[in-house]
Image (cartoon, rainbow, N blue to C red):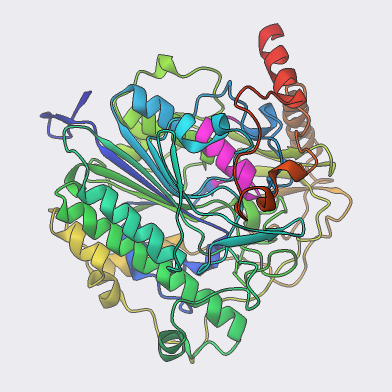
Amino acid sequence: MYIGSKHGDPMQSPNIVVIIADDLGWNDVSFHGADEIPTPNIDALAYNGVILNRHYVLPICTPSRTAFLTGRYPIRAGMQGFPLRGAEPRGIPLNDILLPEYLRRVGYTTHLVGKWHVGYHTRNYGPTRRGFDTFVGYYNGYIQYFNHTLYESKQFGYDLHRIVGDNHTIEYNYKYMTDFITNEAKNIISSHNPAKPLYLQLAHLAAHVSDAEEGMEVRNWGKTNATLGYIKDINRRKYASVVTTLDESVGRVIDALRRADMLKNSIIVFMSDNGAQTEGILQNYGSNYPLRGLKFSLFEGAVRGVACIYSPLIEYSSRVSSQLFHITDWLPTLYSAAGGNPNDLKQLDGIDQWSVLQSARDGKSIRKSILLNIDEKENSAAALIGHYKLVKDNSEYQKYYNYSGNNPLYPKYNATNVLSSSAASAIASISTFVLNANKIMQLRKEATVVCKNFTNFSNCKNRTCLFNIYEDPCETTDLFMKYPEDAERLNMFIDHYKSVLMNQTNAPVDPAGFPRNFNDTWMPWLPDDYQSISEMHFTMNEVTS
């Protein structure tokens, strides 16, 4: 498969590397304006590419990853709601074709390193039977950073696997998970056959909390205290250490692409699956400031995610985009960039935005609306049309946290550190564009969300609120009574999707899948031909629709 380069010469389809952070807050990358946690490599990627400042995701991990892999809203497959638990017999329905399978059909080799979390009760639901040639990582929502175990449903088990085709082995080691993922990615890149394009998905554990006694596990306490000691809150300092280690990983992966002579024809996407969890269940002490709400909610802090894209194939780069972009858009967008035929893609909610990313200046969004989610069990829903967002959220995580991440005692943001980072150096070696400190500071200012009202926040508990999300990005002022026609239009939009919603497929945990049955390891436990009631229901709906 070949596509045209921006200079008109034929070249191989681009290598695609997608890096997914877990529970990373809006305010936890320094290109969004905070000085507290330095992320020079992620920043360099963003400043040399396109910062996606209106990139929307799902409020929690399994639904978000479902949307990314399928290009469809999770409600169509019953994958909305609470994330997949260990030994829970469900997953993305096998009828859905996933992104790596589409890419494999147009000549790509495909690899997943890190988190899966969209089903593994039978081998047919695992990564290497859903489009990935190889998988090195964990099945469940999170593991400990060093010993790679998960304690859930009062069950303790190991969860780190290596699968090539149907050859399945257990990876026993004590390597810090961020480094393990990075080294595996580097090995895949260095050994890649350049005759075929590469799709590499790095799904990091960072910055998710683990179930270790200390919660967030840092790689090196001495280095953490030496470099981040200015952060007085010890839990926030640990979180910052996990994020800076993730940032280092991004730099190492980009440098590996340069060393393999692959960077000049690559697309690199960096995103978070959802916002941070400042407090409550699975709290990691991340920050979504100045956005309202946390993971699990439908406010911007949960669903407006950190994201950027870099590629030498992008003609108009080093910009901040305010175009609406949804996580379902990545499947058609990356498939288009790979040279795939859009007619191959059926019944997607995602929109191909490759041409917009590649060359268009920031104008009117080609995407006009987004269904943010419907959770029929929690009686919550949210959607966005134009400048207006309707939110009905019954979660306990809709509060506002006035924590800016800026303090006179913190080191000031230093553009020189960005320019000298591994990522910036690698990109500079293949680029004719020269990024400078002035441009960095300009882009950082554009990417920083500023809110006008920090004192009075509308109470949206047990009621529906309407916000002008462009003028009021922090969702402070409810306009439901002021603009009833806009509220009704959004309600009708949500009701339309309720007509195609499949009830959540959450199932009771199956003791047959407990680690004690598999040498204390989380493993697939049901036969390949097993079909759940929800899967049969999905199949019947597909036939009759």
For the residue pair 313 and 436, the one nearer the viewer reads as: 313
Q: How many marks?
A: 0
Q: Quadrant of residue 425?
A: bottom left
Q: Which residue is at 84% across, 51% downward? A: 394
User: Along the horizontal axis of the image, is 291 left or right of 360?
Assistant: right
* x and y, in percent, of residue 79 in the image: 68, 36
For the residue pair 358 and 10, the one nearer the viewer reads as: 10
Q: Which residue is at 84% across, 46% downward? A: 481
User: Along the horizontal axis of the image, is 117 left or right of 480?
Assistant: left
User: Along the horizontal axis of the image, is 453 left or right of 323?
Assistant: right
Q: Against 149, is 1 above or below? A: above
Magenta span covers which residues?
Answer: 56-72
Q: Farthest residue in the top direction?
A: 544
Q: Which residue is at 62% across, 48% downward? A: 518
Q: Quadrant of the N terminus?
A: top left
* x and y, in percent, of residue 58 in the image: 62, 45
Q: Quadrant of the C terminus?
A: top right
Q: Against 46, is 109 above or below? A: above
Q: Is residue 472 visible?
A: no
* x and y, in percent, of residue 91 in the image: 64, 35
For the residue pair 80 and 343, the one nearer the viewer reads as: 80
Q: Against 346, is 277 above or below? A: below
Magenta stretch encompasses residue 62: yes
* x and y, in percent, of residue 261 in the image: 14, 49
Q: Is residue 73 visible?
A: yes
Magenta stretch encompasses residue 540: no
